[in-house]
Image (cartoon, rainbow, N blue to C red):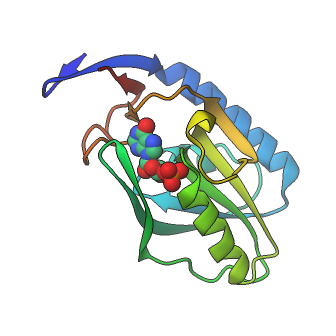
Amino acid sequence: MCRSDLKLELLIGRDEIGRRVKELAEEISRDYESPLMLGILNGAFIFMADLVREMKIPVEIEFVRVKSYRGVNTTGKVEILMDVSDVKDKDVLIVEDIVDTGITMNFLVKRVMKRGASSVKVCTLLDKPSRRIVDVIPDYVGFTIPDYFVVGYGLDYNGMYRELPEIYRICD
Ligand code: IMP
């Protein structure tokens, strides 16, 4: 697929994403009684919406909005645009689109713990462990991928491609 001069190659199709999201929801539903699912905007909005609809237990939903990435280079700095709400004494499951360097997730896990959550776990649709700078091991992972820059299913490149229902890698 070619969109605005960039070549996109299909990496994970719709059906495969759907099946994996369902499996993750079943696993999480077995592990929790009633978690607070904390989605990270903007990237996780589609994953979060699909994941919660497959959950077999009651859940609470909250969002946090952070900015930590520009283009293909990480800034290493996390900016909070919409902060964590009341998580005190809750079992919080942070829902993320992708864990890359781990800087964002490390920052958020600490922040949620500091606000008095009973427990914090991480669910990410995609994991790029080869790029890790900070030691973060997500508890639930949809797909582990190589060091590709990916878009679609909520993930963007300079604010574009979030609407694509599949996940594509940007080719050089
Ligand atoms: P980290 O702090 O480096 O782990 O970066 C996490 C954030 O970077 C994610 O929430 C994404 O918004 C963004 N990001 C990292 N890799 C990609 C990618 O391949 N495509 C799109 N966004 C990415």
**Residue 74, position as x, y percentages in the image:** 40, 51
Left or right of residue 14: residue 7: left
Seen from the viewer's position, the closer of residues 9 and 68 is 68
Q: Is residue 10 above or below residue 145?
A: above
Q: Is residue 72 above or below residue 13?
A: below
**Residue 75, position as x, y percentages in the image:** 39, 57
**Residue 101, position as x, y percentages in the image:** 54, 48
**Residue 92, position as x, y percentages in the image:** 72, 66
Q: Is residue 121 above or below residue 71?
A: below
Left or right of residue 119: residue 160: left
Quarter occupied by residue 118: bottom right
- Number of marks in picture: 0
Seen from the viewer's position, the closer of residues 79 and 49 is 79
Q: Residue furthest front?
A: 133
Left or right of residue 72: residue 55: right
Seen from the viewer's position, the closer of residues 33 and 112 is 112
Quarter occupied by residue 22: top right
| Residue 144 appears in the rendering | yes
- Which residue is rendered at x = 55% and y = 77% of the image? 84
Seen from the viewer's position, the closer of residues 90 and 4 is 4
Instruction: State which quarter of the image contains the N terminus.
Output: top left
- Which residue is rendered at x = 55% and y = 28% of the image? 17
Instruction: State which quarter of the image contains the C terminus.
Output: top left
- Which residue is rendered at x = 49% and y = 78% of the image? 83
| Residue 45 appears in the rendering | no
Q: Is residue 125 above or below residue 45?
A: above
